[in-house]
Image (spheres, grey):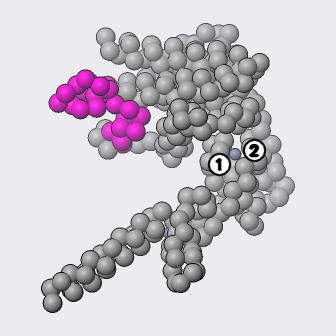
Amino acid sequence: MMKIILLRNAYDFINEALSNALKAETENIRWKYAILNLVQAIELSLKEKLRREHPILIFQKIDNPKFTVNLDTALNRLQNICKLKLSKPDIAAIKKAIALRNEIIHFEFSIDKKKCKLIFAKLLGFLSDFNLNHFGTPIDQVVDPVHWQEAVLISDYAKELFNRALELFKEQNIDDQFIWVCPNCEWETFVFQDEIDKCYICGLQEQVIECYVCKDLFFKRECHELEIQNGSYEDFCLECYEKTIQDDEIYYHEMMSHFWNK
Ligand SMILES: [Zn+2]
Ligand SMILES: [Zn+2]
């Protein structure tokens, strides 16, 4: 019973998403709903996967099965309990869905048509693959054909922009190892070669810096500044930042206990 409900609801949300995307052509605000609908469909699809592993897994508290899990927990359980091997882009798509829902709910989401279409295409692509691979359902067969036209248009638009970016990479000799997934549009088109630091599809400009400790490269927005000497600050990646702070605290406590013991 639950099976029918979860998947049918997921497909309803995909239909709703496409219907909103259609209306968004003339009414920009609809992009918010279209993207939220897709996030909802992703959540329901992951829950269905959990349910097929074991029905109790879809509940937040397994000894008090009242509320069902959120996306974070669903992702966690699929990876750690069900040992589901998700690809890096799949994990990125799910995490993006979580972030988008938060942004939209907290009014931090800015509607830029191009960005919205690119994100929409990414999330829909993930949903198509996930439903086909895990449930054997091609989603073009479960959504309204008129709506599916819109899905094809949006993904063609995104693919065309992506192919144009690929051509530029060739022309400008951009090496694959200097390309990341863009945190704005979610396509693998963010170039940090030669300090270009720019997405070739959506145009996001974002500084990339080296962590003071591990020397790996990170977006500056993900890093934290720490004072290493009087008045001199350096950028630390989150992991190195937390480790440094922790070491400082341990050192402080050891030093203090040394005083107290005397
Ligand atoms: Zn981008
Ligand atoms: Zn680091």
Mark 1 residue type: Cys
Give the image location of residue 91, x and y in percent: 48, 43
- Residue type, label 2: Ile
Rendered position, 12 above or below 184: above
Q: Which residues are magenta?
A: 50-79
Q: Is residue 152 visible?
A: no
**Is 59 on the left or on the right of 102, as rendered?**
left
Q: Are marks 2 and 1 in contact (CB under 8 Å)?
A: yes
Q: Mark 2: few, some, or many residues within 10 Å (few <14, many ≥20)? A: many
Q: Position of residue 3 (x, y in %)?
A: 35, 16
Mark found first going from the N terminus, 2 or 1: 1
Regarding mark 2 in the picture, which secondary structure is present there?
loop
- Residue named by callout 1: 182
Does the numbered disc 2 mark a residue whose Cβ is under 8 Å from ligand 1? yes
**Nearer the observer, 259 or 137:** 259
Q: Residue at x 52, y 29 (%)?
A: 39
Q: Which residue is at a point 84% across and 55% down the rendered structure image?
A: 171
Q: Position of residue 166 (x, y in %)?
A: 76, 47
- Which numbered tag is attached to residue 201? 2
Residue at position x 83%, y 58% in the image: 172
The residues tagged by marks 2 and 1 sit, at their Cα atoms, a distance apart of 9 Å
- Within the magenta stretch, is there residue 55? yes
Mark 1 and ligand 1: say if the CB distance to the nearest ligand atom is below 8 Å: yes
Left or right of residue 261: residue 206: right
